[in-house]
Image: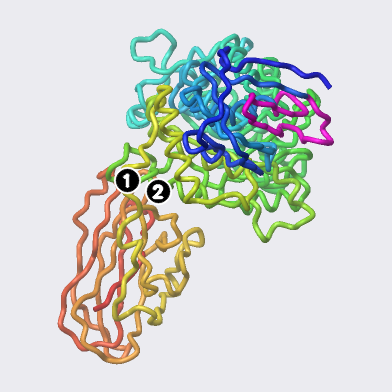
Amino acid sequence: MKLILRLFLFGYVLIAWLPVANAQDPSVVIPVPVDVELMDGVYRFTDGPSVRFKRVSPEKICAEGYVLTVSARGVTVNASDDAGEFYAMQTLRQMTGNGRHKEIRCCRIEDYPRFPYRGVHFDVSRHFRSVDFLKKQIDAMAMFKMNMMHIHLTDAAGWRMQIDAFPRLTQVGAWRIGQTWKEWTSAGARYSEEGSADAAGGYYTKDELRDIVGYAAQRHITVIPEIEMPGHSEEVLAAYPELGCSGEAYKGSDFCVGNDAVFEFLETVLTEVMEVFPSEYIHIGGDEAGKEHWKTCPKCQERMRQEGIEDVDGLQSYMIHRIGRFVSSKGRRIIGWDEILDGGLAPDATVMSWRGTEGGIQAMEMGHDVIMTPGRYCYLDHAQDAPFKEPESIGGYLPLDSVYVYEPVEPSMPANKVHHLKGLQANLWAEYIPTDEHAEYMYWPRAFAIAETAWSPVERKDLADFRRRTAGALETLRAEGYSTFDLSSEYGERKLAQTGLNHKAKGCKVTYNPDLPWSERYPAAGESTFTDGVIGGWTYSDRRWQGFLSDIDVTIDLGSVQKVSYVGGTFMQLTGPGVFMPRKVDILVSEDGEDFRLVTTVWNDVSVNAPELLFRSFDTIMDEDVRYVRYHACRSTMRGFLFLDEIVVN
């Protein structure tokens, strides 16, 4: 075997036995290693540790794995490939605080990844990011053994890659009127010409993207490009309106699947993309296509007739299959959001499951590879602390702990298909994140949690220990110039959500108006939601808030006639995703459940234009002897969601 001696950080080596208490040990490392054996003694150095590398066969150490041994005379790394050596050095880098600590506890670390795909997503369409920013995040990803960088290059807000055959994609599609996504959308979502005084945005040249790809490859990170189709393509249709069903700019967001020119366009674009990005995966989007224009478009209808396609879901599937065959002919594989399942999944396609995990499980059962990125656990665009103290975000609440507790292998997954689960990914959509510093703040430390879940054995995970290690890792990142969340000042969940609430209606039966059911997407605890004593947190997606796309009309049976002095329920408003206060709430009571009398009507006084997360109690004080309480909340004229967590009766 070949034995190589290198000086890490090119330092002068000094060996000494020192008290173990003064030395850094592997307990600081993220992701937590597979196995750690502490030994007597300390290795001390001045500028940098001496490291010996020894190659072994893959039968002894798996791909990306390593064995790192620290003795009093130096460090030895055994690995079967370059990636394993590299990850060993990242472990050593953390143990030394990137060179700040000069004493290391003697130990033996055996380590290897749980999943081969450990990803971070970058939305450069909504807000363009500099090359330097992306390289900086690559450095952080590498430190924590993440190996897939997914770049969302195209979307309505901007086309970000130079394409030689279609120059107007960047001459028009990369520039908009409005510096931020919010300014752009509020001004009508219009594009501009490159060089115009009102043009905001930017794009990457092919040479810049090759530079990013090369920089990442040196750190064992693969860059995966995403070119959206068939939806989220307004910027393309502004530059080349003939590719849409209407043939006009600003009319529709989907490619015209009945038009052969669309496939000529996409194949040409993807060919240029694959010339720059050598990744096995080419991400084709596939999410949230409206498909409405396809229902009346003559070309789309003719395509459906010729191909024997029954509905527009089938038409999308036709497109995904066709693009999949083209990409496969180039020796690559397509990956897309879980909507690519609609109408039938293309052969060899990999599914990125974001609308929960159901789509991913379905794809696994069909024999397809899957990357899990469910929004409830992996969408870092949600606030990571109490929204009132955080920068503006799309809404929701996803603290570090909630990311960390996610376990991608679910009991419902068929045992003989689990090998199709290739890993997971942290996603950060950037509509409300205009600056590089804000984006960095949203990634770190929550991406640490994704890194540990993707790398470490599930039995090695421990939340309290992870938080301790996270504090040290954040200190290291901040020392290197990163903007991070300050975990020491974390406010946490709503206080009532942590403690719950006792009241007269707790545990009582609730009868729902059968014509006004809750939304299947937000059932919370079903019929017991409003009287279970559980109070909702900062986000409507925490399975404590019950959601309605209608009025809420329920009746609570207290079990006997008793004195009631208070009835109330709390609603939330977050206008971005379409969550509004009720227009009014009627509170009625009855002794027999038949004859109800109106106690009061509580009218809403919260503006539908308020941008921030708001909570308001619709309640009343009374002095009544009642058994039944009816609570009727009338939906806002904005026609969005109503969310209610508990109806309190005292």
* Residue occupying the point 46% across, 69% down: 525
Q: Quadrant of the N terminus?
A: top right
Which range of residues does the magenta coloring cover? 55-84
Please give the residue where the numbered disc 1 appears in the rendered image: 387
407 and 562: which is toward the camera: 407
> Would you call the spot at circle 1 few (<14 residues within 10 Å), some (14-19), or many (20 or more)?
many
Residue 612 lies, in percent from the top left, at 28, 44
| Front one among 196 and 50 | 50
- For the residue marked with disc 2, what is the amino acid? Tyr
Q: Is mark 1 on a helix, strand or loop?
A: helix
- The disc placed on residue 300 is none
Q: Classify 384 as above or below 595.
A: above
Q: Earlier in the sequence, mark 1 or mark 2?
A: 1
In the rendered view, would you say 272 is above or below 477? above
Type of colouring: rainbow
Q: Which residue corresponds to mark 2?
A: 397
Percent across and percent down for residue 534 are 38, 68
- SS at badge 2: loop
Q: Does the rendering let one see residue 289?
A: no
Give the percent coordinates (x, y) of residue 545: 40, 61
Name the residue at 62% across, 28% down. 72
